[in-house]
Structures are given as C-alpha cells and as structure tokens.
Image (cartoon, grey):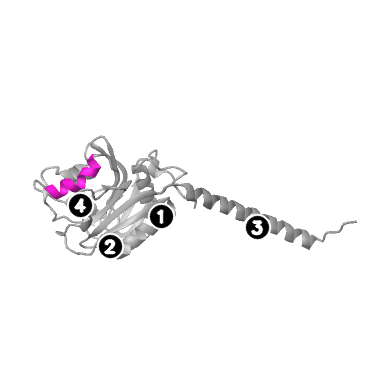
Amino acid sequence: MLRVSFRSFAIAVSLISLTVGLSRDAAADEADAKIKPVRALLVLGGCCHDYKAQMDLLAKGISERAHVEVVIALDKDTSTAHLNPVYEKANWAEGFDVIIHDECSSDVKDLAIIDRILEPHRQGLPAVLLHCGMHSYRSEGYPKQVTPWFEFTGLQSTGHGPQLPINISFVAPDHPVTKGLADWTTVNEELYNNSEGKLLDTATAVALGQQKGATDAAVVWTNNYREKTRVFATTLGHNNATVADPKYLDLVTRGLLWSCDRLDEKHLKAK
C-alpha cells in the first residue's frame, strides 16, 4: 500500500502551486514584453518648481502604471524666458506618440518658436499639459485674446492664489479617464484661475477644484484641439507631494493613455 504523509502531500501541493504561479508570472512577463510601449516625451524645466525631483516621480510613476516609455527633456535653466533646448530642432517631436508639457516658460513669447512647438500638435500629435504648462508662452495679445498656446491648452489662466488644500471633485463620471478615480483633497497646492470663469468651447471639464476663499475652477479637463488632436490637462502638480501622490499619478497616466487612444487593459499594467 502506498502511503503518503500529510506533510509530504502539503509540500507537493505547495511546490505545484509555486510552479503554477511562476509560470503565470512568466507568461505575464512575456505578454508584457510583446506590448509596444507608448513613447512619451516629458518636457520640463524653467521657473518655480523642483523639476529634478518631479521628472523622476512622473517618469517612474507613469511607467509603473502603464506600458509607457518616458524620455526626459529637462531644461536646467530656472528662468521663465529660456527655451528648452529640445525645441531647437524643427522635428523635435519625431518618434514620439505623446508629449507631456510640464515647462514653466511664460516669457518665451516669440511666435515663430511657439508655432514650432505647436506644429506637431496641429498635425495630430496628442499632448498632456501639467501645471505651469498652462502658464507658458504668453505671446502678444495675452491675456485679452486667446493666443495660440491657450487655444492649445483649452483654458486661459492668468494666475493663482495662495497654497492651500484643494478639494477635487470629478464632474464627468462617464469619461474614460475618471473610471475608478475618487474625489480627494490635495496637500497645499496652487489653484489656477479660469480667465472669464470658463474653458474654451473646445474643452470639457473633468474635475473642479474648490479652495478656501477662491472661486471654484476647472482643474482637470480635455481639449479637442483643432478638431484633430486630443489634449489632456491639469493645473495640479506644483509640489512634489502632489506629484508623488498615487491619486495624481493614476490621473495623469489615464489622461496620457486617453490622449493617444490607448486607455485599455492592454496598455494599463495590473496593480
């Protein structure tokens, strides 16, 4: 009679389970390896922010959540008037699926340069705009006119108030970007105003922000730029603690994938 002790049986089952688990992990890794990652160019630098820390927080946080390869273009100049060197070439965006604009360059006002930056987007290249990207490239006519950069962003913001917590309320529950996301309150952050209190007609609010003593403002939105380009934008992201917040990184990652029409289970990584 064959006798197998309970201990031996338990060890055998454990080994089988471990082998199956390893096989599944290997299969998942193999499947992941076959997915062509989204190539994102993260442009950042200029005034007023800890970009050296935030570039790593964003690149790591996004790539952990989705099949996205983030290439960083950091301008080490800390003024508002210096052009990020990545824009010096006419084909600066070649080879990328989406651009993340996180620069702080309000005093770069040469319209020829701004046109060079916008041209790939005018041809359909998706974009993500973060925080001070909304306060950049204030060319002639700003703020009385909707200048080229603000046609692109979908919202003309002229300033912000003090750093205080912002209550975030998602107002488009059926939008793909908001799926699975919950309202939250930030750490001390800057609430950017909405010039004339509204988005452009091409833009749609995804979340509103409420801050003590300030008028509620759109803090997350999408823009249909020239009827051919998806733009995802948020004014949140001044402080490192916000950029490092998993809720913020979830939002930005989903917005990025949505902008290039890849917000699906294939490109999102399992948590």
Residue 28 at x, y percent in the picture: 54, 50
Q: Does residue 31 appear anywhere in the picture?
A: yes
Identity of the amino acid at label 4?
Lys
Residue 27 at x, y percent in the picture: 56, 50
Viewer-proximal residue among 33 and 258:
33
Report the residue at 24% width, 50% height from top. Answer: 92
Circle on res. 63: 1
Report the residue at 53% width, 50% height from top. Answer: 30
Q: Does residue 195 appear anywhere in the picture?
A: no
Label 2 Cα crowd, 10 Å radius (few <14 / some 14-19 / many 20+): many
SS of the residue at dot 4?
Answer: loop
State whether the magenta stretch is mostly helix, strand or loop.
Answer: helix
Counting residues from the N terminus, which is met first, the one under dot 4 or under dot 3? 3
SS of the residue at dot 1?
Answer: helix
Residue interval drawn in magenta: 112-122
Identity of the amino acid at label 2?
Tyr
Q: Mark 3 points at which residue?
A: 18
Q: How far apart are marks 2 and 1 (CA)?
A: 18 Å
Q: Nearer the viewer, mark 2 or mark 4?
A: 4
Circle on res. 89: 4
Res. 126 image quadrant: top left
Give the quadrant of the N terminus.
bottom right
Identity of the amino acid at label 1?
Ser
Counting residues from the N terminus, which is met first, the one under dot 2 or under dot 3? 3
Question: Would you say 48 lies left or right of 181 here?
Answer: left
Q: How far apart are marks 2 and 3 (CA)?
A: 43 Å
Q: Name the residue under label 2.
A: 51
Q: Nearer the viewer, mark 2 or mark 3?
A: 3
